[in-house]
Image (cartoon, grey):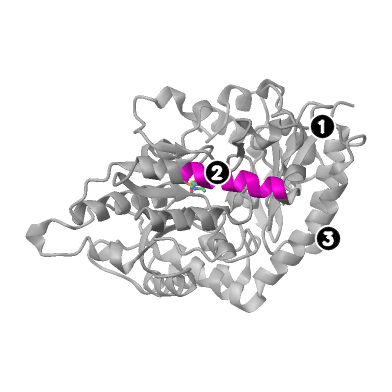
Amino acid sequence: MDETQRQQLAQLDHAHVWHPFTPMRQWREKEPLIIEAAEGDWLIDAAGNRYLDGVSSLWCNVHGHRVPHIDRAVKQQLDKVAHTTMLGMTHEPATRLAARLCALAPGELNKVFYTDAGATATEVAFKMAVGYWYHRGQRRDTLVALEGAYHGDTVGSMSVGYSATFHEPFDPLVFRVERAGSPDVFHECGLRIAECGVARRWALEDEAHVQHVRDAAIESLDAWLTELDGRVAAVVVEPIVQGAAGIIVQPDGYLRGVADLCRKHDTLLIADEVATGFGRTGAMFACELESVEPDIMCLGKGITGGYLPLAATLCTDEIEQAFCGELDEHRTLYHGHTYTGNPLAAAAANASLDLFEQNDLLSVVNEKAAAVAERLNVLRDAGRYPYVGDVRQKGLMVGIELVPPGERGATGFDPSRRLGYEVADGCRASGIIVRPLGNVVVLMPPLAIGQANLHRLCDVVIGRIEQLGK
Ligand code: PLP
C-alpha cells in the first residue's frame, strides 16, 4: 500500500471508526497502525513493517497466522457454504466440532450451545444456570462471582464481571451479583497480597502463605454460600487465572476447593475458559489442572485457533434435559444469535483441533512456558528493575506488574502515568506488539511461537522495562 492510500485509510478510520477499549481522542492524535497482512508469528503493517504478535491478537491466536491447514479448511468450507442458520437446521462442521469438544472437555459436559463471542458464551451460561433451577421448580436469583472477575461486555457478563473503572456509567443496567473474595485478597489483614509488603509472586512462593491465602478465600466462600443457601444458581469462575484482572494466578488447590463447595452447597459451577481454554495454561482446559469437572464451561477466543468469531457454552446432559419437555411446558431456551455456529468458523475450529493433535502442542507449551519463566527471573533484581513489583505466569499467560520504585509491595501507580503503555509503545518501536492491562504488561504469544521469536519477545520487553524512568 502506498503512502497516499495509507493516509486515506488513516483519515477514514479517524473519521468513522470507534475502536474497542480505546480512548478515542488520544487515538485520533496519532497515526493508526494499519495491519495489512500476517505470516506465522508476525503481523505486517501497510508500510511493510513486521511486528511480533506478542498478545496473540488479543489472546486468541494459537498456531500463528495464515496456517496452511486452517486456511485450507476455511477455503474448502467457503466452496460449500459460508453461512447457514442453526435455528431449525444443522451442518457438518458445527456438528463434528460439538462432538469433538465434548470428547475433549472435562467431566460430563455433553451438550454444546454455540454463540460468537466470549461475552455471549458467558451470557448463555448464566441463563442455562438460572433456567435449569427454574425448570426444576426453584427460583434461584443469585450468581456468585469473584472479585476482579471479567466475563465480557454485554450487560449480563458486565454485571457478573463488574469493574468500577469500566462499568460505573452503566450502573443502572447491571444486576446484583454476590462477590466472593478472590484468593488475591489476603484475608487476615484485609489487604491484597500485593499490599502485604511483598510482591505477589514472591509471596506466593512461601508455601505456608499460599495455603493461608487459599484456605481463607475458600472459607469465606463457604460462609457466603451457607448464608445464601438455596438462592445461588451458580458460582462463576475464571479457572486458575483471572486474566483481565491482571493475570492473577490462583493458589494451587483454590479451584478444587471452589468446585467442592459447589457440590457441598448443591449449586452449579460455571467455568469461564474463554481466556484459559485451548492450551493457554499448559492444559487443554485449565480445569484439568485441578481435575475439576464444571457443570457449564464457556469457550471462545482460541477455539478457532484465533481465526474467526465463534464461542461455545458446554453443559451436562442433566442441565440440557431441564429445558426439554412437551411444547406446552415452555421449557425451550429461547436464546440465539444469527451467526451462531457459523460453518466457516466451525471449519477453522476443527482444523485447529487437528493441529493440537498432530503437533502435540500442549507439551510444547509447557516447555516454552518454562523457558519464559527462566528468562523473566531476571526481573527479580530490584536494583536493575526497580519498577517491577511482580511477575505472574501460568503456561503462556504472563503478567508483569509495574509498581513505583522502592515499593515492590504497592498496588501500582496512578493510572494516568500509563506506564504499561509506555512499555508497550517502546516494544512496538522495536517490532513487538504487546497490550497492557493498566500497569500490568501482558505477554500472551501464539502457543506455536518459534523459540527464537519467544526469546526476542522476552529480550525486548525486559529491555524496555529496564529503560523505565531513565
Ligand atoms: N471471559 C473471559 C475470561 C475473558 O477473558 C474474555 C475476554 O477477554 C471474555 C469472557 C469476553 O470475550 P469476548 O471479548 O470474546 O466477548
Dot 3 crowding, Cα within 10 Å, few <14, some 14–19, many 20+: few
Task: Quadrant for the N terminus, please.
Answer: top right
Of 420 and 354, nearer the camera is 420
Q: Position of residue 411 (x, y in %)?
A: 69, 29
Q: Nearer the viewer, residue 6 or 290?
A: 290
**Residue 350, position as x, y percentages in the image:** 49, 71
Per the image, the residue denoted by label 3 is 452
Residue displayed at 37% across by 60% down: 114
Discs 3/1, front? 1
Q: Is residue 73 magenta?
A: no
Q: Is residue 224 left or right of residue 431?
A: left
Give the SS element for disc 3: helix
Between disc 3 and disc 2, whose residue precedes? Answer: 2
Disc number placed over residue 387 in the picture, else none = 1
Q: CA distance from mark 1 to mark 2?
A: 29 Å
In front of the other: label 1 or label 2? 2
Amino acid type shown at disc 3: Ala
Dot 2 falls on a residue whose secondary structure is helix
- The magenta segment is 208-221
Q: What's under tag 2, amino acid-wise? A: Ala
Q: Left or right: where does residue 231 sit relative to residue 33?
A: left
Local packing at callout 2 (Cα closer than 10 Å; few below 14, some 14-19, many 20+) is many
Q: Residue 375 location in percent, x, y?
A: 84, 53
Find residue 6 and report its horizontal and vertical position in percent.
65, 38
Q: Which residue is mark 2?
A: 217
Q: CA distance from mark 3 to mark 1?
A: 26 Å
Q: Nearer the viewer, mark 3 or mark 2?
A: 2
* Quarter of the figure with residue 421: top right
